[in-house]
Amino acid sequence: MNRVLLKLSGEALAGDKKTGFDEETCVAVAKQVKAIVDKGVQVAIVIGGGNFWRGRTSNKIDRPKADGIGMLATIMNCMYVSEIFRTEGMDTNVYTPFLCGTWTKLFSKDEAVADLNGGKVVFFAGGTGHPYFSTDMTMVLRAIEIEADCILGAKAIDGVYDSDPAVNPNAKKYDELPISKIVDD
Ligand code: UDP
């Protein structure tokens, strides 16, 4: 594989704390990514925001605003992890789908691909820029756009279940899940 899209959930940055950043955990992620970057693999990264906020965290406030807060959380995450990556000797750029002052660059496929070809790790922060989506949607969208060879999803769950296994101990895991079943059910 030459070009991979890595998705990290926000909680993957928080270690045992579940919220905020755990620096040791993030440095460990950086070292693992550097190992494949040094072998010539191009790495693009999407990070969630669940260690700070998800749109569904509040049932009270306006959903698009709540999702906006979630998208901003993903930017904090990407800025932080990008800086950690730099301390580990990698070159990085953070892209967002909307203007974010001088903190990030406005997403451009051509610029991101040029960065990847030049050995930089690129971060896609701010999700899709639209409410009612998640960073898993962003992961798929950006992977297609940059023509990634594969998506690596680092998630707290090991597959797709019919309900949340953290809540339902009898949740059923699907080994195979054809699109026709999703449509039919
Ligand atoms: N979000 C959004 N649009 C997007 C991507 C994310 O509105 O395109 C918001 C949404 O509120 C989401 C939050 O950002 O809950 C954080 O993303 P996600 O829940 O995917 O984070 P993760 O669970 O992977 O940490």
Image: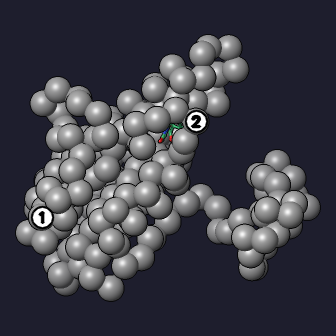
Q: Which residue bears the numbered disc 2?
A: 132
Q: Is residue 3 visible?
A: yes
Q: Please give the name of the residue rendered at 29% of the width and 33% of the height, measured from the top-left corner.
A: 98
Three-letter code, disc 1: Ala
Q: Where is residue 67 drawn, in percent x and y? A: 52, 29
Q: Please give the name of the residue rendered at 52% of the width and 54% of the height, measured from the top-left corner.
A: 136
Check residue 97 in the rendering and tell me which mark sits there, or answer none: none
Q: Quadrant of residue 122?
A: bottom left
Q: In the depicted view, which residue is nearer to us: 49 or 108?
A: 108
Image quarter hosting the N terminus: bottom left
Q: Which residue bears the numbered disc 1?
A: 114
Mark with earlier residue (2, 1) = 1
Within 10 Å of disc 2 (Cα), the crowding (few <14, some 14-19, many 20+) is few
Q: Please give the name of the residue rendered at 16% of the width and 51% of the height, measured from the top-left corner.
A: 93
Residue 184 sits above or below residue 103 on the image: below
Q: In the depicted view, which residue is nearer to us: 53 or 169?
A: 53
Q: Is residue 113 left or right of residue 141?
A: left
Q: Is residue 63 left or right of residue 94?
A: right
Classify mark 1: helix, strand or loop.
helix
Looking at the rendered structure, the number of numbered marks drawn on it comes to: 2
Q: Quadrant of residue 71?
A: top left
Q: Please give the name of the residue rendered at 82% of the width and 55% of the height, measured from the top-left corner.
A: 163
Q: Quadrant of residue 158?
A: bottom right
How many angstroms separate mark 2 from mark 1 (CA)?
30 Å
The residue most toward the right is: 170
